[in-house]
Amino acid sequence: MNANPALLSLSDIASQAHEKIQLDFADINPVIGVMQGMRKMGIPADVLTIDCLVTNKRILVVLHDLHPGIMRYQFIFIDQDPGDDYQEVASSDVTSDTVYGWIKEYFSVVK
């Protein structure tokens, strides 16, 4: 992957959270994707997605070159186009525990 350091770091953080989620929750099996296709369209940004196929939910994280040090994210459905209502967080505040919490809260199946 020809990626910027922020994307590589986020990918590592998401992988660590994924590992812990799989140990703690049998019904959540997130799928993590990294996309750099926006760059091919002239948008200087990378995207990380975390999908839950069971609930059809997606966590979308955008790293934009014009906003270094900031992650924009939103919780959507896989078959839904993202809206303009992104939350922002400092990249330095996002840890594997942060991503674990997002996955746990948003993807948990209510029984």
Image (spheres, rainbow, N blue to C red):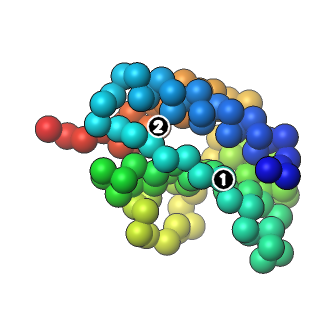
Local packing at callout 1 (Cα closer than 10 Å; few below 14, some 14-19, many 20+) is: some
**What is the crowding at mark 2: few (fewer than 14 residues within 10 Å), some, or many (at least 20)?**
some
Residue on which the image places disc 2: 102
Q: Decide which of 99, 84 is in the foreground and name it.
A: 99
Q: Amino acid at mark 1?
A: Val
Is any part of residue 61 visible from this angle? yes
Judge from the rendering whether residue 31 lies leftward or rightward of residue 105; answer left or right: right
Q: Is residue 62 above or below residue 102?
A: below
Visible residue check, residue 67: no
**Callouts 2 and 1 close, C-beta under 8 Å:** no
- Secondary structure beneath dot 1 equals strand
Q: Residue flagged by tag 2: what amino acid is it? A: Trp
Whole-percent x and y of residue 69?
80, 41
Relative to 106, 1 lies left or right: right
The number of numbered badges drawn on the structure is: 2
Q: Quadrant of residue 79?
A: bottom left
